[in-house]
Amino acid sequence: MNRIVMWSFVRGLTNNSRRFGSVAGLGGGGGGGGSLRVTLTAMASPGTRYQSVANEGFHWRRMMSSSMAVAEEQGMKNVENQGKEKEKEKEKEKEKEKEKENALVSSYWGIYRPRITREDGSEWPWNCFMPWDTYSANLSIDLGKHHEPKCFLDKFAYRVVKLLRIPTDLFFQRRYGCRAVMLETVAAVPGMVAGMLLHLKSLRKFQHSGGWIKALLEEAENERMHLMTMIELVQPKWYERLLVITVQGVFFNAFFVLYLTSPKLAHRIVGYLEEEAIHSYTEYLKDINEGKIENVPAPAIAIDYWRLPKDARLKDVITVIRADEGHHRDVNHFASDIHFQGKELRESAAPLGYH
Ligand SMILES: [Fe+2]
Ligand SMILES: [Fe+2]
């Protein structure tokens, strides 16, 4: 009896699996229900087992047509998921291999940079700055502030800066892109020189710096990022590059000596230079607004550094750079004021978050 039942069951399945060969492979919930129904029918009328199984197979097939569709869909989803998982595994393996390659390339010591991503999960493309170095510029800063020169040193600093502006105006005129490149190559020097000298002083005198070393080095870094941004927009000509090299050679040494001699004058000169930078970028913006300079899309580096929207334009970039210059102006006039009061910078804590 059991053998007959089993035989009917197997024949029924064989017939059906010939027509619906994918059922066994699918193994979904619908298939399982169908098998159970065939078995019960065969057991109820063993005398007509072949016909019964065949008929039942027909009904089963009809009933299964809908469950088949569901099972096929589920099967497709399973296959898709499996495919995705395999892809993920492959990606992970690739990353591991990359890390190993980097470790080998970097150095004998196996030093390598871990994968860094943006907030949206995409790969961080920059080595020159990291996501934690980025910020939103403070656009509420008062751009019209001016330190009125009263004493001799202030007036001297003011005149020096005004004199320096004459050759710059003659050379660049209204080519604000090239002018900005030149300006930033100079502007990134004082923070580095001042930070370096304060660092050495801190070591020499066993004194804390009051946060000024970091603040000034950050200013230099911020100015360098201005330059890295501008260089994406303007390609200087060979003679402009030559001028940059010459000016850097002269300015670095001159500022180094000046800072050793009179840090209060040095900071005041930088304060006035920053006021000029604000003026230059304001003129730059005016030309963009008037259509004299094309308001091109913002460089990718600027979008990431200042956390700008993806559709940001040149105008947005110049606006945030100008806000930074406003900060530099305030920090340097503040530093000069501390010296004018007969104090050292470390006696008054450096401002935080000023780029
Ligand atoms: Fe700058
Ligand atoms: Fe600046």
Image (spheres, rainbow, N blue to C red):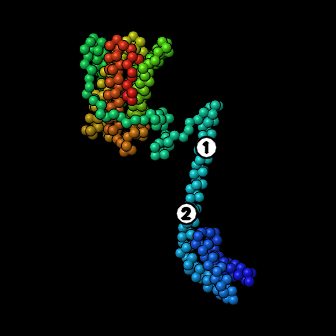
Q: Is residue 353 left or right of residue 146?
A: right
Relative to 60, say whether 304 is above or below: above
Amino acid on which disc 1 is placed = Lys
Relative to 78, say whether 292 is above or below: above
User: Image quadrant of residue 341?
Assistant: top left
Q: Residues within 10 Å of mark 2 (few under 14, many from 20)?
A: few
Judge whether residue 269 can be spotted in this image. Answer: no
Nearer to us in this view, 277 or 237: 277
Return the residue found at the far bottom.
47
**Residue at the location (47% across, 35% down)?**
130
Q: Is residue 295 left or right of residue 53?
A: left
Q: Residue 1's x, y, as percent?
A: 74, 83
User: Image quadrant of residue 254?
Assistant: top left
Please identify the quadrant where the C terminus is shown.
top left
Q: Which mark is residue 96?
A: 1
Q: Is mark 1 within 8 Å of ligand 1?
A: no
Helix, strand or loop at label 1? It is helix
